[in-house]
Structure formats: structure tokens, C-alpha cells
Image (spheres, rainbow, N blue to C red):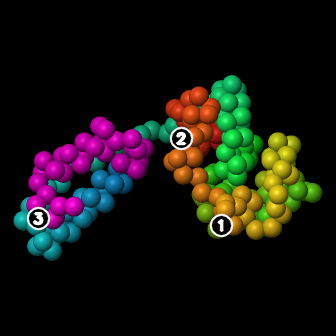
Amino acid sequence: DKDIKSITPADARGFYNSLIIDGDIAGATAAKNWATTTLVFKFAFTQGLIDTNPALGFDRPQSAGARDRVLSHDEIKAVWSAAGTLGRAGQLVRFLITTPLRLSMARLADWSMVSLSDRTITITADAEGNKAGKSMVLPLNDLAISVLESLPFRSGPVFPGRSGRPVMFADRTKKLLDDASGFSDWRLHDLRR
């Protein structure tokens, strides 16, 4: 809550270090946060709002390389079991284990996209999280079908929250999943490998 004119290079260094050294966020996120910060300072400097840019001279944080974390069979079993304690969010995790879908694609899936009889889910080209930008019809295996068949509804969001909108998967939910599974050095995206 400082006035931008009172931010010093030492303040900027402290923020930079909190992203790079102390940060508990992914490298790409740290890099984006720092890029936004430097743009704000650059804009303020060019508009005459500050006399010096306190963010000058810092290297841009490097994104971490591609993750290659693969859960072991025992870890997947532990996550599957732990997911059974988390209601709809847990059902969503179990569905993620059984499919190659990204969290956003599965979380936002609607029953109109699912055909239990054809054992498929259709992802449209414009679906959130669809980086390929192409429509896809994906086959669903027996476990995916069993997760879907266990759900009480057959219209609207496949994984609705209490509000009826798609269930949210918050950091708190991941923490509960970590605690129940007995390990935390993984991300939901690692289930896709």
C-alpha cells in the first residue's frame, strides 16, 4: 500500500526476491508478475509520475523448464482414494485421472458434451483450456464412464458445485487432497502424463 513515488530500488529488489527466491509460484507466473511490475514502473516513469524507475537493472525471472513429473502407480492410487473424500471436486479429480483433459476443460464440461452410449466427450475448438484450438471427440475408458455414471445429474455442468455452476478447484482443495494422499510434490496437470 505504498505510493508509487515512495517505492525504492530496495523495495523492488525485495519484491523481485519474493518472486524468485521465496516465491511458492511457478517460474512462468513469477516471470509474468515481474513483467507486469516493470511495465507499470516504465509507464509511470514515461508519464512523469516517478523520477526514476526502481525496477531497472533486474534480470527477468526465468520460467522453469517443462515439468516431467509422473506420478507412480501407488501415488495415483493414493490420489484416487483421497479424491473419494472430496465430493464433487474429488469426482472431478478422479475424472482427470482417467482422461487426458486439462482441469479447465474437465471442470467446465457440460453434459451436452458427453455421450455415455458412445463413450465419448466432445471438446469444442473454443473450449476454455483447449490449446489445440480444434474440436476433439475423445473416447472415455471404463473408469471415466464409471465416474460419470456415479454422478447424480445428467444435464448442466458435469461437475456442478453447490451453486449449480461448475465446481471450483481451489488451493484449499488441493491442500486437502495432498493431506489425504500423503504427498504434495505434484500438480493436477501431472495427472495428464
Depth check, front residue: 52 or 95:
95
Using the image, determine if residue 35 lies above or below residue 45.
Answer: above
Disc 2/disc 1 C-alpha distance (Å):
22 Å
Instruction: Say which label, 1 or 3, has the lower sequence index.
Output: 3
Residue at the location (12% across, 51% down)?
A: 9
Q: Which residue is mark 3?
A: 5
Please indicate, yes or no, whether residue 78 appears anywhere in the rendered image. yes
Magenta span includes 113: no
The 10 Å Cα crowd at callout 1, few under 14, some 14 to 19, many 20 or more, is few
Q: Residue at x 72, y 40 (%)?
A: 84
Which circle's residue, 3 or 2, is located before the other in the chain? 3
Q: Main secondary structure of the magenta part?
A: helix
The answer to whether mark 3 and mark 2 are in CB contact below 8 A is no
The residue type indicated by label 1 comes to Ser
Label whose residue precedes the other's in the sequence (2 or 1):
1
Instruction: Name the residue tied to disc 2.
Output: 175
* Quadrant location of the C terminus in the rendered image: top right
Q: Is residue 45 above or below residue 136?
A: below
Residue 165 position in % (x across, y down): 66, 66
Element assignment for label 3: helix
Side of 15 where 133 appears, left or right: right
Left or right relative to 19: residue 71 = right
Proximity of marks 2 and 1: CB atoms separated by less than 8 Å: no
Q: Residues within 10 Å of mark 3 (few under 14, many from 20)?
A: some
Residue type indicated by callout 2 = Lys
**What is the number of the mark on residue 163?**
1
